[in-house]
């Protein structure tokens, strides 16, 4: 058997601006995730919901939730990824953490802040793309609105897996479905999207649609309800499809400024 990555996608409702309640809820929900899962993916701003009022959440909560992620990663013996509000030097970030099973971590700040909701006015924009090497897979994690910008996600690093964590509302869910599949096809990589469900404190509804697509855009997993989705990613699938089709050899060169 070739190299495989066992993943779990946690699609759930979230408590509005209440990190402690969300951490408690996720402990209960993740209790069913079996040992042997390599990577657990949580939604965007999983400790609060997609709030544009970060000052409603104590600045210490970012480090508390990061510590919680480290504890959970060690407990489940799996990597854990998701984004949270993180305050640093008086500035707020929509920051994704990729926490390894030993508690070490790497981070990524959302590059494309969602101007339609005013995210650019309260959260700093990131500048650096993150590529994580994990269990012989190269993983590129991004956040929600980044999905709409294919140049930023372009596979110039030969990553194997593209991950989007999101709070993507029902009125635009058709775009979510199409763009996840498109990112998989154009980058010849697995594309994972984890959305939330339920309603937030502003009345927006989130319909799930978390999914996994393979390098050819075939749907591997999908759900519209509160659920934990499981999928197995195959390194051999990535390598064989790229060796056979070689589409990435013809990609355009560019410099992002």
Image (cartoon, rainbow, N blue to C red):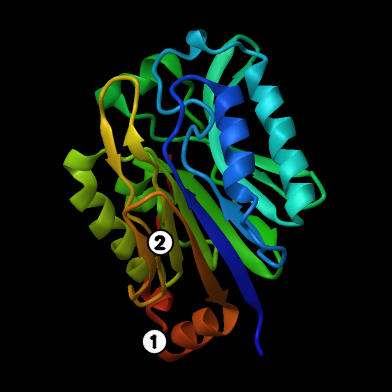
Q: Mark 2 to mark 1: distance in Å?
A: 19 Å
The residue indicated by pointer 1 is: 245
Instruction: Give x and y (percent) for residue 205.
Output: 26, 34
Instruction: Give x and y (percent) for residue 185.
Output: 34, 70
Tell me, yes or no, if residue 37 can be seen here.
yes
Where is 59 relative to 158, above or below? above
In the image, taking residue 163 as reference, residue 219 lies left or right, namely left
In the image shown, does 116 or 156 lie closer to the viewer? 116
Query: Do residues under tags 2 and 1 come within 8 Å of each other at their CB atoms?
Result: no
In the image shown, does 119 or 244 lie closer to the viewer? 119
Residue farthest toward the right in the current orientation of the protein: 102
Determine crowd level at label 1: few under 14, some 14-19, many 20+ residues with C-alpha closer than 10 A.
few
Residue 49: quarter of image: top left
Q: In which quarter of the image is the N terminus?
A: bottom right
Q: Please name the residue shown 54% across and 73% down the image.
A: 233
Where is 218 relative to 227, above or below? below
Instruction: Give x and y (percent) for residue 138.
Output: 61, 64
Q: Please name the residue shown 64% across and 41% down the image.
A: 27
The residue indicated by pointer 2 is: 253
Callout 2 secondary element: loop
In the image, taking residue 240 as reference, residue 40 lies left or right, namely right
In the image shown, does 10 or 140 lie closer to the viewer? 10
Determine crowd level at label 2: few under 14, some 14-19, many 20+ residues with C-alpha closer than 10 A.
few
Q: Please name the residue shown 50% across and 55% down the image.
A: 9
- Number of marks drawn: 2
Tell me, yes or no, if residue 97 can be seen here.
no
**What mark, if any, has residue 195 been given in the picture?**
none
In the image, taking residue 244 as reference, residue 176 lies left or right, namely left
């Amino acid at each position: 058997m070739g190299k495989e990555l066992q993943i779990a996608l946690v699609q759930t409702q979230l408590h509005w601006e209440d990190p402690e309640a969300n951490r408690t809820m996720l402990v209960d929900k993740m209790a069913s995730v079996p040992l042997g899962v390599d990577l657990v993916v949580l939604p965007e701003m999983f400790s609060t919901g997609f709030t544009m009022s970060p000052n409603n959440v104590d600045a210490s909560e970012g480090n508390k939730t990061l510590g919680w992620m480290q504890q959970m990663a060690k407990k489940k013996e799996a990597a854990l990824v998701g984004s949270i509000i993180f305050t640093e030097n008086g500035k707020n970030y929509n920051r994704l953490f990729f926490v390894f099973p030993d508690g070490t971590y790497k981070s990524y700040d959302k590059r494309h802040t969602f101007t339609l909701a005013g995210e650019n006015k309260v959260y700093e924009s990131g500048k650096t793309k993150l590529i994580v090497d994990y269990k012989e897979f190269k993983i590129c994690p991004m956040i929600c609105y980044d999905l709409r910008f294919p140049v930023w996600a372009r596979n110039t690093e030969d990553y194997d897996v593209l991950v989007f964590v999101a709070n993507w509302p029902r009125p635009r869910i058709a775009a979510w479905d199409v763009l996840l599949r498109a990112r998989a096809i154009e980058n010849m990589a697995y594309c994972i999207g984890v959305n939330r469900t339920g309603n937030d404190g502003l009345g927006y509804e989130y319909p799930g649609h978390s999914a996994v697509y393979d390098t050819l855009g075939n749907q591997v997993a999908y759900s519209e309800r509160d659920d934990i989705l499981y999928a197995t990613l195959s390194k051999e699938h990535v390598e064989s499809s790229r060796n056979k089709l070689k589409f990435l050899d013809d990609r355009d060169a560019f410099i992002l400024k």
